Structure formats: C-alpha cells, structure tokens
Amino acid sequence: MKKLKFPTAQTILLLIAALVAGLTWLVPSGEFDTLSYNKSENIFTKTSLGQTTNLPATQQTLDGLEVKIPLEKFTNEDIWKPIGIPNTYKEVPSSPQGLEAFIKSPIKGIIEASDIIFLVLFIGGLIGIMNFTGAFDAGINWLAHALKGKEFLLIIIVTTLIAIGGTTFGLAEETIAFYPILIPIFLAANYDALVALACIYLGTSIGTMCSTVNPFSVIIASDAAGISWTTGLTGRFIILVLGTLICILYIIRYAQRVKKAPSKSIIFDQKASIEKLFGNTTNATVVLTRRLRLMLFVFTMCFVIMIYGVSNLGWWFIEMTAVFFVGAVIIGILGKINEATFVDTFVKGASDLLGVALIIGIARGITVLMDDGQISDTMLNYASTATNGMNKGLFVNALLYIFGGLSFFISSSSGMAVLTMPIISPLADGVGIGRELVVNAYQYGMGLFAFINPTGLILPSLAIVKVGYDKWLKFVIPLVIILTVFIMIALTIAVYI
C-alpha cells in the first residue's frame, strides 16, 4: 500500500477555504456598526447596514456611542481604521459562499495580496543576483570560520535581533527575505534548515506576540481600548524577555542534538535535497574579495533602509519592493553583469519564490470568503457573549483562546485590534480588571496561535525552506504548550496582583 503523504501548503489552504465557505452556509451573517474619522472634514462617519451618517467629531459623540476612546486618538490618527461600535451587532441577510465564490477566492486573494506578492518576487530576484555573483558563498564561508566552535551564538543573535524587530515595529512579512540568506549559514554550522526556520519564525512570532512599542499591534490595540499603550508595558517587556529566552533555549536544545547526531533531525530525509537547494555550504575555495564585501554591504543596507523606512518614514510594500529592486541593480553593476544576463538571473530568482507568492494569495482568499460571507462579526459577537458572567481569572484566560481562535479568521493584528477592542475591552470593566489585560490577552492569543496558524505566515515560510507543515508541527507543538502554560500563569498572576 502506498504511503499517504501530508498535503502541500497550497492544498491545506484550499481545504481551509472550502471549510470557511461551508461555514458561511451555517453561521448567520451579521455585522457591527463601524465608526471612522475623516480628518479633512473633521467629522465621524458611522456606517450601519451600508448606510453612512456624518456625526460631529466630539467626545460627546463617542460617549453617546459607548466608545470609550479619547477623541485625540482619532484626531492624532493613532486610530486610522474604522472601529466596531459596541452593542450594535445585528444579523443581516445570509450571504453563503458557494462553489463559484470558492473557486474565485484564490484569484481575488492574489489580487488583494499583490503588494506583498511583488515584494516576495523582487526579493527572489535580488537573491538570484547575489547567488550569481558568488557573494553569498564567500560571506558564508567567512562566517562559518569566524563562528567555528561557537555556532550557538548564531541562534542567540538571530533570534534576539528578529524578536527585537517584531516587538518594536512588527517585523513579520519582511522576514521572508531572510530565509534564503540565513539557511546556508546555519547549514554551514552543521545545523539543519529547521534551526534557521525556527530562529527566524519563532523570533518574529515571540517578538510580535510580546509587542512593546509595535504601532500595528499594542499601540493601535491600546488606543482602540481607550488606554495609553504604556499601561502594562513593564509586564509585556518581562514576558518578552522570558518568552524569547524560552524560545532560544528550545532551539539550542534541538540544534545541539542535530549537530551531534544529524540522523535525529526531524527533516533528516530531506538533508541532501535541502543542501542542494541552498548551495554548497562547504565550499572553502571562495574568497571574500573587496568587491564581494561591497556587494554584501549593499545587500545588507537594503534591509537597514527597509527597516528605517517602515519604522520612521511610513513606508510599506511599494517602497520596500523598490529598495530591493534598486539594490539588485546596484549589485548587478558592481558585479559587472551584462544586461541580458541580469534580466534572466533576476527573473529566475523571482520564479524560485513564485510558489511562496501563490500561497500568500490563497491565504488572503480565505479572508475574502469571510468578508463576503459576513461571518467575522458574528464570530466576534459569539466570543464577547461567551465571556459574560465569568470571574476575572477565567475571563482573561478565556480571552486568550478567543483571540487565538479569531486570529484563524482575522490574521491581521491591526485588523483584529480595531475590530475587537471596542467590543471586548469594555467587558473588562464589568469583571474588575484593567483593560491592558485585554490588550495583553489579544497579543498573546494571536501570537501563540501564529506559531501554527495555517492562514498566517508559517506556510509561506515553510514553502521557502521546503519543509512540510506536519514536520513543523512535530517540532513546534511542545514549545507552544510550554509557552501557553507560561502565558496562562502570567495572565492569572497579573489579574490578582
């Protein structure tokens, strides 16, 4: 009998899309009224069942709608997305998504996710150019010698730096660029590709899960909850440090086991194919010349400029993509690559990540089905109703799982914040806890589920490394259990101190 294989990422997402389409036939459609701020006219716009009403942009308007958020949060543009209005949920005519909608959803998702898809493709092109010049081989060879006997430092440095990026400015989608670069380095250190994947993905996951100053997570969620983002900051920082330490120790434990006995690698059966895919990491003949050093410097500066632009200049995917494109051109000039060869190499590099781009689009298609079926708000209404009458310890831990479950359907942290915080944060007042604990539960719940969430970034990340979702689950589930217990204890202590 032929052994059954675990389905590919694309198939998993299409199965989830089919499940979501089926839910739209079973779950009633509904929606909350929303409120948005128009800065140019200094008015609020309330939307209810497709009808819009202009309201004065005053604190009295917010109080009358039971929106417990200071007016300046809107006028300062801290909240720039429409928020849900508490106690306004209403059922609307059912909008089930049938076979035609299911078939169209990946196409619509690819169109909606075109910004990040182009970023991924241009990163692939840049990496193709870098591989062609030999700069990566030379840099990896140098680093492998520099870290000889101290390879564990690579795990600590990479995981910590990426966690810092996640907690400060929401480093997430951008990490897709790091896999093809760092995997060869980890392979040269006699680790497997899963160690590189873990350092990058767990780093960004724990960082965004314990956001301290991330404007796309803790700041917008706190604003939407009507509190200052500094409230609860100390506790979140402590959780960040301890959570990152747990992740690093977990990765090092696995990495050392693989280093001593490669056959104990979860992906040992893929060892030869992965090493072939990411190049010959034992090539000691490549010399790091001055020209190659300059290319590596330009390549590194692409990421520095990208990070600075996103965190300080309001850049997003178009600007990030432009940075990588310009970087590829400069490196091509430094490498004296002729025009035809440059174009062919860039296109081939982009095509290597086309499968990843399609996965991102298919995942976005699931969100399209949810929105068209109008069941997201219904799920939120069920969640807020389920917490009525709970004691505060049970309440905050229930929210942890509620937010984790909702993130399956709403993977955007800012989208989750503006949709849920105005509805759920007032419930904290009734059970006698601070609203910052609701913000924490939102972050931790989304973050914990992000470690395994198939509608998030894990499947595109796995596609780059060519590792199956089943093998990732085998690796990460024990860590998720450890972190969940840790977070539940921390939340419970925070409620009663």
Image (cartoon, grey):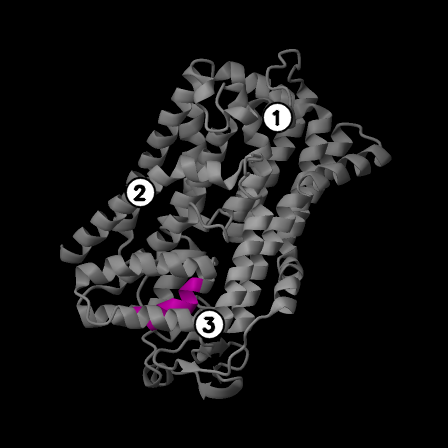
Mark 2 burial class by Cα count in 10 Å: few <14, some 14-19, many 20+: few
Q: Quadrant of the N terminus?
A: top right
First along the sequence among labels 1 and 2: 1
Q: Tell which circle, 1 or 3, labels the residue nearer the N-terminal end.
A: 3
Question: What amino acid type is highlighted by mark number 2?
Answer: Ile
State the separation of the CA atoms marked 1 and 3: 44 Å
**Residue 137: quadrant of the picture:** top right
* Residue at far left of view: 497
Residue 79: percent from left, percent from top: 44, 68
Find numbered disc 2 in the image and state the secondary structure of the residue it sits on.
helix
Q: Amino acid at mark 1?
A: Ser
Magenta residues, as a range? 416-424
Provide the major secondary structure of the magenta segment.
Answer: helix
**As rendered, which of 260 and 11 lies closer to the eye?**
11
Three-letter code for the amino acid on which mark 3 is drawn:
Leu
Task: Please tell me whether mark 3 sits on a helix, a strand or a loop.
Answer: helix
Residue at the spot x=26%, y=55% of the render?
A: 232
The percent position of residue 209, horizontal first and vertical second, equals 38, 49
Instruction: Tally the marks.
Output: 3
Quadrant for residue 323, please give it.
top right
Indicate left or right for 454 with 343 as reference: left
> Foreground residue, 159 or 353?
353
Along the horizontal axis of the image, is 375 left or right of 223? right
Q: Which mark is residue 481?
A: 2
The mark closer to the camera, 3 or 2, is 3
SS at mark 1 in the image: helix
Q: Which residue is mark 1?
A: 273
Residue placed under numbered mark 3 in the picture: 26
Closer-to-camera residue (165/343)? 343
